[in-house]
Image (cartoon, grey):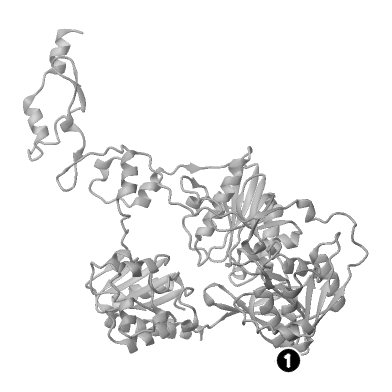
Amino acid sequence: MSSNEKIIALVSVGLHPKSGRARRADQDARAVELGLSLSGNALEMLHVGNADNADNDALRSYLGMGLEEMTVLEQGAGSSLSETLGDYVKTKMPDIVLSGVRAESGDSSGMTPYQLAEQLQWPMVSSIADIVKIEGGEAEVLQALPRGQRRILKVALPFIASVDGAAAGPRQSAFGPASRGSMCTIAASVQEQAEPSHDAALDVQRAPARKRAKRMKIAKAKTAADRFKAATVKSQASGGQVIKDKPAREQAQAILSLLLEEGVVR
Amino acid sequence: MSTQETSTGFRRNPRQDWIARNRLHPLHGQGTVFPCVERGPTGLVRKNLHSIGFIGPGGLKRIDRSSVGSFVANAGRRVRPEEAVLEQLPLVKIENPDFYIMAVLDLVGGRLTEHDKDVLGQAHKLINAHSDKGAVLAVVFGESKEEAFDKAGVDRLIHFDQPNYQSYCPELQVAALQKVMSQWQARYCLFPDSIYGGRDLGSRLAAKLGEPVATQAWQVDKDLAISRGCGGREDLSRKTPRFILLAEECAHPIDETRHEVLPLTLESQVVTDPRIEDAGMLAVDPSKIPLGEAEFILSAGNGIHDWQQFHEAAAVLGATEGASRVAVDDGFMPRATQVGATGTWVTARVYVALGISGAVQHMQGIGQCEKVIAINTDAGCDMVKRADLSVIGDSQEILHELVELVKEHRRGESADVQ
């Protein structure tokens, strides 16, 4: 399906969960894949940050997915990420902006698409698995829910969507096109160096993740007899309702009413 | 001390003693009860060990050393543990609190999740860290089946259950939360950082108000909030912001007190112009859902002989198929469907075990399931002990009736719609 909607996919540098090596972020790559399947080569890939550092290879691996060009926005020191992004997106006026749910580097707060949506006053659809169709200025979107469920949402263009890990997997990144692709850097506007931004004032300290203690079962016994019981007695299964020697229909009815009560049979 | 007093005080009535000792005597229990501690004939304190305890239901002497409850009064009936706890938990009442902590709960399937309870526990932890008096203001949306809000630590409850909150409506929910915030001036806003909507809602509200937010926070106190960042590789510590999205197991849930659960209502109506429209759920093929994620599993074991019927039943019920090791080893089901320690550890909300007696490995695999229904011919098997509802009988017959009932139920519903 190749339509004439203008789509921007926001990409960031990912980190491998085990080795910590820079790579293309999984959800961002899925967003690019979704964008490619919707608008083909008309898709624009956008990265905010610095292109000429060690992360270059990781960013280039997005170019290895088939596009020839990628835009890199330099972020001014005085402006926040969402402001920089918002200003750029306003000039481009795309129909859809796609991003991942949570970045693999940085704060991983997942706030960027929400802040961008707030700045542009666009609707924000979270954790989507697919965009089924775009018709008459309205898109039908599949939202990924826990337990493999999908919800159909209808939203008017333009909108921002974060792409979940349940979306179609990204295509392989080819090394040749990745090396040949060009990075088009846009320098930060002059309004930076104004006052320290809102986030910087919060003063975040970073440290390697500490291992979290596993939650233990606490026996809150007040007497020695209770402590003894907690230590020795096998937790007595309360044993639910048992239906015995009844006609099969009555037994089945009991099961059905429980299934209906739990809402699993619809 | 006069002689008269001593002579009457210490004199025993041997006949009364004998009646009191002999529980088969017709007058037993009517006469005086031995005091546990009394003076002997010489004036020394004597403990009468025979009068300690009481005669239990089996005719055996029972001694209650916990001195918690009156065992004698309850000797005849079995006290369920929750019931016993409820009698003891003190009720905490907070009148005219100085501040509120807003906790927006997920309420998956209408019930509090463990994550929700942790969030409420964290809210109370924050309240205790402050010197002034605070109350937890819980906000829930949609249908609620929860009855234990009091034991989870909810002081005040706002329940938006109007029909327009029943479907997916994040914009409406954000508008409602804004109203709640402006009316009650919450000092902190806590959300579970979950895939069930807590994360989405918290991010939306924080972005709307342009406030900083700590996501995946796992250690929060009055001054400092530590949260995971950089894809879980780093800890970010910052001054505790007003908006906190809490990770699982951030704090211990409340278990020693009960709270009032006073219902509150908004003064004004919530009006929005929603731009996202919920067009309902997509019918997902249950057999395509990974077993570990499936919500509703129909699992078969050694007691199943009609496999065609089993597959049909799973299709009609809309359940994902599972199997015990025996069924897989015998070649009736593929290896990928095996539930248990050697197969998949399932997290289903409802697990129906057909003809599975419940080997230890299998029980481990279904440890996280909420409701287990057992259909078995053996009433004494482990699965029946674990199950919330057990049906003893021929699985083939019961399954047949169940499928018929579900079909009837669906027909009845579609007739109602027309």
The extreme right residue here reads A190
Q: Amino acid at mark 1?
A: Ser
Identify which residue, A186 or B27, lies in the foreground: A186
In the picture, measured across the screen, residue A260 lies left or right of residue A62, that is left
Kindly indicate the quadrant of the structure image that contains residue B314. bottom left
Which corner quadrant of the image does residue A193 belong to? bottom right
The residue at 27%/74% (across/down) is: B376
Host chain of mark 1: A
Quadrant housing the N terminus of chain B: top left
Does residue A135 appear in this view?
no
> Seen in the image, is A249 located left or right of residue B169?
left
Residue found 31% across the figure and 61% down from its top: A239
Q: Image height check: is A117 above or below B313?
A: above
From the viewer's side, name the closer residue of B40 and B293.
B293
Residue under label 1, please give it.
A2
User: Residue B397's quadrant in the figure?
Assistant: bottom left
